[in-house]
């Protein structure tokens, strides 16, 4: 029986690898040419090219999948596409009414697909979708499912910990801070760090009158390129609260390296 299971697993892996190879070899233009059904309900002009590409690739790659995780990814894809194409749809073309109509078609598609996918995942126990249903639609039962995942220790990704922090930020600042620290410790090398974490840590520590930590995390965020955080202003806050600016800068450099190397932990 074990050998049969191993063989089944091997077949699945090989199938996925072959499918990925097939997919990666096709450009979006090729996909649209071969499969116009994947593309025809999106705006046909050059606007929102990157957002459209993500939707089309996702449709192709997961067209035979009904997994909630894939629906969550597509919800985010359509949110980004809607934000882009709604701006494009507001641009009036006196001579090019077809472009204007095409963009409106794309906007209506985004609205329709967001409504459809939201309905399909309304009662999902997937932690990403549970948070989505609460944060976007205010469903309290979805929040309860999300917090159950927290209690059972199943929010073990940076994104989920950031989501958890947004829940706790107005309810328990200590829990919010811990969730943000946890997020920083969970980033993989190939994941882009959400720089909002640093301005949030600055604000939360400052509100708790933990000025040393506020200044240090503000400086870390400034090093990561968060334009909301200004080094001169942060150092002025340090001087006001009699914090050594040399120490703060050294500590910020140390934490920046730890986070950037994906080597941060609660004891850093």
Image (cartoon, rainbow, N blue to C red):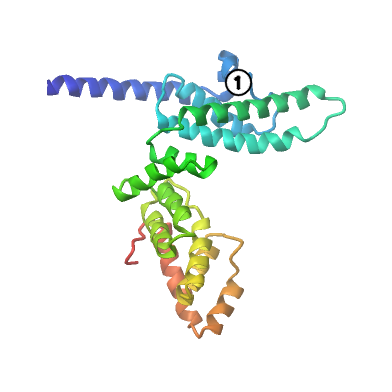
Work out which quarter of the rendered image holds the C terminus and state it.
bottom left
The x and y percentages for residue 162 are 45, 52
User: Which residue of the protein is positioned furthest toward the front in this rendering?
Assistant: 140
Residue 79 quadrant: top right
Q: Quadrant of residue 236?
A: bottom right
Examine the rendering and report whether any part of residue 156 can be seen. Answer: no
Residue 256 location, x and y as percent? Answer: 45, 64
> In the picture shown, does residue 104 fall above or below 174?
above
Q: Quadrant of the N terminus?
A: top left
Q: Residue furthest left?
A: 1
Q: Quadrant of residue 5?
A: top left
Kindly identify the residue that appears in the image at 82 percent across and 25 percent down: 96
Report whether residue 40 is seen: yes
Q: Nearer the viewer, residue 132 or 194?
A: 132
Task: Give the residue number, with chain letter if any, for mark 1.
Answer: 39
Q: Nearer the viewer, residue 220 or 22?
A: 220
Where residue 247 sits: x, y (%)? 45, 79
């Amino acid at each position: 029986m074990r050998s049969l299971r191993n063989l089944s697993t091997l077949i699945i892996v090989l199938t996925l690898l072959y499918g990925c190879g097939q997919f990666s070899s096709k450009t979006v233009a090729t996909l649209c040419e071969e499969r116009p059904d994947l593309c025809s309900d999106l705006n046909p002009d050059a606007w929102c090219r990157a957002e459209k590409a993500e939707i089309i690739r996702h449709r192709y790659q997961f067209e035979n999948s009904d997994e909630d995780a894939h629906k969550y990814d597509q919800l985010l894809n359509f949110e980004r596409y809607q934000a882009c194409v709604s701006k494009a749809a507001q641009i009036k073309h006196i001579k090019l009414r077809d472009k204007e109509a095409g963009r409106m078609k794309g906007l209506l598609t985004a609205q329709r697909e967001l409504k459809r996918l939201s309905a399909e995942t309304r009662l999902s126990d997937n932690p990403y979708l549970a948070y989505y249903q609460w944060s976007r639609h205010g469903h309290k039962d979805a929040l309860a499912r999300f917090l159950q995942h927290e209690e059972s220790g199943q929010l073990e990704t940076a994104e989920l910990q950031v989501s958890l922090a947004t829940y706790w930020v107005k309810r328990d600042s200590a829990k919010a801070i811990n969730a943000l620290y946890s997020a920083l410790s969970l980033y993989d090398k190939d994941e882009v760090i959400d720089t909002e974490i640093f301005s949030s840590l600055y604000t939360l520590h400052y509100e708790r009158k933990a000025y040393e930590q506020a200044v240090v995390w503000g400086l870390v965020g400034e090093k990561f390129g968060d334009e909301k955080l200004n080094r001169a202003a942060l150092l002025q806050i340090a001087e006001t609260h009699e914090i050594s600016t040399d120490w703060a800068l050294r500590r910020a450099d140390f934490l920046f390296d730890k986070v950037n190397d994906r080597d941060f932990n609660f004891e850093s």
